[in-house]
Amino acid sequence: MFENVFHTLLGVWHIISLVIAIMVACVTAIVYWSKVKYWHMEMRLRLPWIGRIAAWTRDPGKNEEKSADNPNAVGFNAGERGVCGAYETYYGEHQPSEENFKRNLDYLGKADEADRSEKGLGIWLLMIVLMVIEASAFGYALAPFALTLATPNTAIVGAFFIGLVISIIALVLSEFAGRQLYRNGVVNKILSYESIRDGGDMTKTFNATIDDTYNDDGAKPFQQLLNRINVPIDKHGQPQRRFSIIIGYGIFIAGLAIAAFWVRTETLNQQEAMLVENPTAVVQSADDFPVAAGDEELPLPTDMAELSTNSSQKSAQDQIDAMHRASLVTFAVLSGLFCFIQFASTYLAFRHSFAGTYSRRAWELTHEYNSADEFVRYHRAKSAAIAQDAQSSLAKLQSLQDKVFRVNGKTKDDLRQNKDHRTFLRYVEEREIMAHNKHNRALGLESTRLLADYVTQTIKDLRTALNAKDNKKVWEITDVAGPRFAAINNPALMAQKAEFNELVAVFGARPNEAQPQAVAQAYQPTPVAATPVPSVEAVAAVDVAAPVVEVAQVIQPIEMPAAQSVGEKVAAFNPHAWGDLTQFDADDMDYVANKKGVPVDDLKRARRLQMLDKAEA
């Protein structure tokens, strides 16, 4: 049976080779996906007649005009922008620095995955070989029952492809199961720190990326690992293990093993039944010295014929028993091969996978280089090569456009304007300027929004304090916000600035600090009682040569508020003019008076009155 399957597969080797070649091509494209994308992009641009360059030659599009974001635009047309934009994506991927290399290594180190790697092309080819072997084994088991109405060769080929599909499904499940096993191992590693952690829950503090990998330098190792892994999280933010894929994979493998064993058993029973029905055919097929077709058969005596028949039956039974034992051994070998292939696939997936969210990207950027200097030199050379390819494609487009005298109303003069300045590097420079200007404008809008929110909230707080008649709060707001409002020059905020200034001008005035000093000087009973009111005759008797100042000095005491009553004088003294003085000790009054420029006696008096008000309250 095995020989028949082998010879049949050899007869359709071209089909099997095509399938294997397609799988190898797919795996190669996956492993070298970035290079494949770049090649595909260039092919789409450069294809004759149907490529993008050919289309832009017929319709170059409108030239780019100067704008606020790009004030120094040289006028790239739509076709040129399309060519340069296609290359700019790949050009930007090769501009990292030494610091970028160090950040990637730091991310991998904190994720505890510095020694891991993804599957290379060699490992993928090994898995394809194992998958083809597994498919052949399934084909051997399924051939007697697959496509029973078809020819034997077609049935064997169909069984092989059915086995190939089953092998692909098993490979995919083993890949996901291996990755889930590895992630569960990472969760176990994190939870092993739970007994020695310094309080808190085993939760993420933030989702660490490559750019902010230094933000948790001072954290514990388990916290750094937890901030980077991509594992299921429960409702409390703690990492959880998952076994759904592993269980499904186990059920699939167990069901497949049972089905394969049943198929092989039925195949063996069918073969044994055929041998029991026709034992002579078994003996004849096993005869080492068959009689030629032209030879005459010699008649045998009756006893010899009976002995020959018994010997044939015994020989057939021996062959059936031997075939049964050989089939069991074959089934055991195939089962062992199947288990080995599944174990190998699962182990490779477990060993070559990442749990960190950005670990694979960090590995891709660093695994080919031994140092940061080598990393930078490679990317500089790669970016220069991409810039050269881009300039070549751009020059091809421009030369094809020059061959057209008039393209959608555009003349050659229009196409040649600033042609020498329309290069790929100039395009990259303009895009960087535009991105910078847009970023600055976005920052300006954000700053304006924050400032507008502050202005609105400040005016709201000021009105609230005014409605509550809380002068202390009003003065506090005006002291802090006044200089800030004075610095506002945004036209959009001038109306609110004027509103604030108007409120401050009306309600922000404080009591005159010089007023208590004047009252204290006026409150002198002796000068008022001793100074007589001068009459007209006394004034006339004054010497004409006397200075006017002396007259003013005589008149000055008359204009002082000496005639105020005691109640009015007490009412004119405001004990709260200098704030809350009860928070200071009596020994501190000299220092406070010096700071405020007020006589210490007035401050002591105001403090005593404030303490009286608080006691009565």
Image: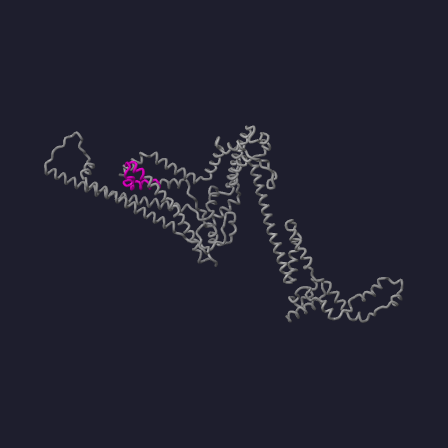
The residue under the point 41% across, 53% down is 241
How many circles with numbers are drawn on the protein?
0
Q: In this view, does 37 lie to the left or right of 504?
A: left
The picture places residue 422, in percent across and down from the top left corner, at 57, 34
Span colored in magenta? 130-159
Is 595 situated above or below 399?
A: below
Q: Can residue 591 be seen in this view?
A: no
Magenta region includes residue 141: yes
The picture places residue 303, in percent across and down from the top left corner, at 10, 38
The picture places residue 462, in percent across and down from the top left corner, at 63, 58
Where's the C terminus, which quadrant? bottom right
- The image quarter containing residue 455 is bottom right
Most extreme residue toward the front is 409
The residue under the point 49% across, 51% down is 207
Q: In this view, does 71 lie to the left or right of 389?
A: right
What main secondary structure does the magenta stretch of the protein show? helix
The picture places residue 62, in percent across and down from the top left corner, at 56, 35
Where's the N terminus, which quadrant? top left
Q: Which colour scheme is used?
A: one colour
Work out whether residue 401 or residue 97 is closer to the camera in this orientation and state it.
Answer: 401
Q: Is residue 597 left or right of residue 185?
A: right
Q: Can residue 22 be seen in this view?
A: yes
Work out whether residue 409 or residue 451 is closer to the camera in this orientation and state it.
Answer: 409
Magenta region includes residue 333: no
